[in-house]
């Protein structure tokens, strides 16, 4: 199959906008709880839809009173917290456009985002954010920026007070002016290469996609369900899910610090969660290491193998009786404890941002947590495709959501169209024109559709390595396997225009001490010292050899180096959505790469 287009299940009137999704609930007799704020000692304070809408309206009046015109761009820079979503809706109530800014951004990144979007105001979380925004404004001369409000200060109260005299009729006029075709937000791509581009996402992108997803996933998102948000709301994935939850009547909690995630999961008890694959890897690896440290490693590995086998058999349509019995035993010994650690009620998870891999997908499905893997980009408001409870094929990213379509070009590139696709790049008609062909958006990813319309991602077009001999190599096929080991944090496969394939590997700082102790080595060994240990070199060599068995000899890693510091967002080597910035890694580790290819004969 080369093309699949799914007609929409839900069609909204053209005058609809995102605020209508909230007002459906706020004006209903049910008036459900849509959000919960953290309270004292692990408690949560419920916010009914009407209360949330009233506060958003009060803040919107403050924006209006401050002179921000309809269509004005307002920056929003904060960690994932209740106020992020509140301010987002307030901006839409005021008829304005939200410009998310990652709270970890540098002054130059902030200056680019706010300057390129011509933002006239910005709401920040804390004094440190206000300081860095002021620094960016001073350095780059952000002449359009007139207002900075701070959440942790009295900024929101000042906005509410400023809007006291704004008439309700004026607010309603501003709120209702936006329709499906109006721009709702400009989200800047996190930029693995070059300057971030501003993606113009419309109210239609969020409204139509949310209503159609809710109709497609009734077992997962439904009135009364609950989820906890810990991914950055500045990223399109979490942002879209946040709007989807409002549309579907799902209660949402927020946790700004992932260090508190396990405790928050215990107290909030969500029905489903959303995460990037690295989070699922961490859950798996930490569970395994905890079992091994407690002398129960054999039980974990046997249980994991059983979970994967059970899931595969279930997908094939028949689970043997012996496997069913083993699965029940391990559910008591292992699976129920992992589920309990995540709050005890989680039965579904939505994964996006990068490929999850079949092994993890089958493991979590086998322990009773079905991971619904999807696929999309900032330019597609997150999901183009997604696996559903009724149509699930682990190892794929699902079929197009209603209203979306997927097409495979002659060179294997995935093309997309439908309610998910952005209007274009802000102020970049040249880039917009380049990105579309015959009405289809060019994703830059490589994939294939099976005969049932399930999409499988095989690589990133721009990341395909072409060796000096002309061999095409997809780095993710090797990287994902090596990175799946708890000792490894990141793996970057190299070899473009080079005689052979190599890799840079970093160690996981959290997992390293436990690994060292299990190998009778000092847990106080530093990351830099660990890279020189023969035992570590031997372990990574074994991982590379195993990964190499999945590819041809020409695609196999012939040399690798363990580098002494991890690739992180703070180091500039990961985007906020945890994607590798290959260009930056190559630049910063140029001497290491050159040493690999300096004439030394590669290992077999």
Image (cartoon, rainbow, N blue to C red):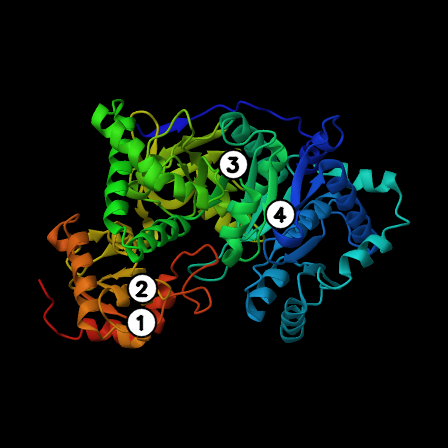
Residue corresponding to mark 1? 523
Q: Earlier in the sequence, mark 1 or mark 2?
A: 2
Q: Earlier in the sequence, mark 4 or mark 2?
A: 4
Return the mark for residue 185. 4
Asked whether, in this view, residue 562 is left or right of residue 173, the answer is left
Q: Measured along the vertical axis of the image, is residue 291 above or below residue 318?
A: below
Q: Residues within 10 Å of mark 4 (few under 14, many from 20)?
A: many
Question: Distance from label 4 to label 2 (Cα)?
Answer: 44 Å
Question: Distance from label 3 to label 1 (Cα)?
Answer: 38 Å
Residue corresponding to mark 3? 271
Asked whether, in this view, residue 294 is left or right of residue 551, the answer is right
Question: Distance from label 4 to label 1 (Cα)?
Answer: 47 Å
Marks 1 & 2, CB-CB < 8 Å contact = yes
Question: Distance from label 3 to label 2 (Cα)?
Answer: 32 Å
Depth check, front residue: 404 or 368? 368
Query: Residue 38: x percent and y percent?
Result: 64, 50
Q: Residues within 10 Å of mark 3 (few under 14, many from 20)?
A: many
Quadrant location of the N terminus in the rendered image:
top left
Depth check, front residue: 604 or 3? 604
Q: Secondary structure at mark 4?
A: strand
């Amino acid at each position: 199959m080369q093309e699949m287009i799914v007609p929409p299940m839900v069609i909204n009137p053209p005058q609809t906008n995102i605020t209508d999704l909230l007002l459906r609930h706020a004006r209903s007799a049910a008036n459900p709880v849509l959000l919960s704020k953290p309270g004292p000692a692990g408690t949560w304070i419920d916010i009914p839809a009407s209360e949330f809408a009233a506060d958003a309206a009060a803040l919107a009046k403050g924006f209006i009173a401050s002179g921000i015109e309809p269509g004005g761009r307002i920056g929003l820079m904060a960690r994932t917290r209740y106020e992020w979503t509140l301010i987002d809706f307030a901006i839409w109530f005021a008829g304005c456009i939200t410009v998310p800014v990652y709270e970890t951004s540098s002054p130059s990144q902030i200056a680019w985002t706010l300057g390129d979007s011509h933002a006239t105001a910005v709401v920040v979380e804390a004094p440190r954010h206000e300081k860095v925004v002021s620094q960016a404004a001073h350095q780059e001369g952000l002449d359009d920026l007139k207002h900075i409000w701070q959440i942790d200060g009295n900024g929101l109260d000042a906005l509410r007070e400023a809007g006291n005299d704004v008439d309700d009729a004026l607010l309603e006029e501003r709120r209702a002016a936006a329709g499906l075709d109006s721009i709702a937000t400009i989200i800047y791509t996190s930029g693995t290469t070059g300057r971030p581009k501003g993606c113009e996402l419309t109210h239609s992108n969020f409204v139509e996609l949310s209503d159609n997803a809710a109709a497609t996933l009734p077992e997962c998102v439904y009135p009364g369900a609950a989820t906890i948000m810990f991914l950055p709301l500045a990223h399109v994935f979490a942002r879209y899910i946040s709007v989807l939850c409002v549309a579907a009547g799902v209660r949402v909690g927020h946790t700004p610090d992932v260090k508190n995630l396990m405790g928050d999961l215990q107290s909030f008890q969500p029905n489903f969660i959303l995460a990037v694959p690295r989070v699922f890897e961490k859950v798996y690896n930490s569970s395994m290491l905890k079992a091994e440290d407690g002398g129960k490693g054999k039980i974990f590995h046997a249980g994991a193998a059983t979970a994967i086998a059970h899931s595969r058999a279930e997908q094939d349509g028949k689970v043997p009786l012996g496997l069913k019995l083993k699965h029940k035993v391990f559910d008591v010994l292992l699976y129920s404890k992992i589920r309990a650690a995540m709050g005890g009620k989680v039965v579904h998870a939505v994964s996006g941002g990068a490929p999850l891999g079949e092994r993890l997908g089958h493991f979590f499905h086998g322990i009773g947590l079905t991971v619904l893997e999807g696929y999309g980009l900032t330019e597609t408001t997150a999901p183009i495709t997604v696996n559903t409870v009724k149509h699930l094929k682990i190892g794929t990213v699902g079929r197009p959501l209603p209203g979306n379509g997927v097409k495979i070009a002659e060179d294997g590139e995935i093309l997309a169209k439908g309610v998910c696709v952005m209007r274009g790049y802000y102020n970049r008609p040249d880039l917009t024109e380049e990105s579309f062909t015959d009405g289809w958006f060019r994703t830059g990813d490589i994939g294939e559709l099976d005969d049932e319309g399930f999409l499988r991602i095989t690589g990133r077009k721009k990341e395909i390595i072409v060796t000096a001999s002309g061999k095409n190599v997809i780095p993710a096929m090797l990287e994902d396997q090596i990175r799946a080991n708890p000792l490894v944090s990141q793996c970057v496969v190299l070899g473009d225009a080079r005689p052979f394939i190599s890799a840079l590997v970093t160690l996981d700082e959290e997992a390293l001490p436990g690994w060292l102790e299990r190998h009778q080595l000092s847990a106080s060994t530093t990351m830099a010292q660990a890279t020189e240990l023969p035992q570590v070199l031997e372990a990574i060599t074994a991982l590379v050899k195993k990964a190499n068995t999945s590819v041809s000899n020409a695609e196999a890693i012939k040399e690798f180096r363990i580098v002494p510091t991890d690739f992180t967002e703070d180091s500039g080597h990961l985007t906020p959505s945890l994607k590798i910035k290959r260009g930056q890694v190559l630049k910063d580790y140029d001497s290491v790469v050159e040493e690999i290819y300096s004439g030394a004969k590669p290992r077999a």
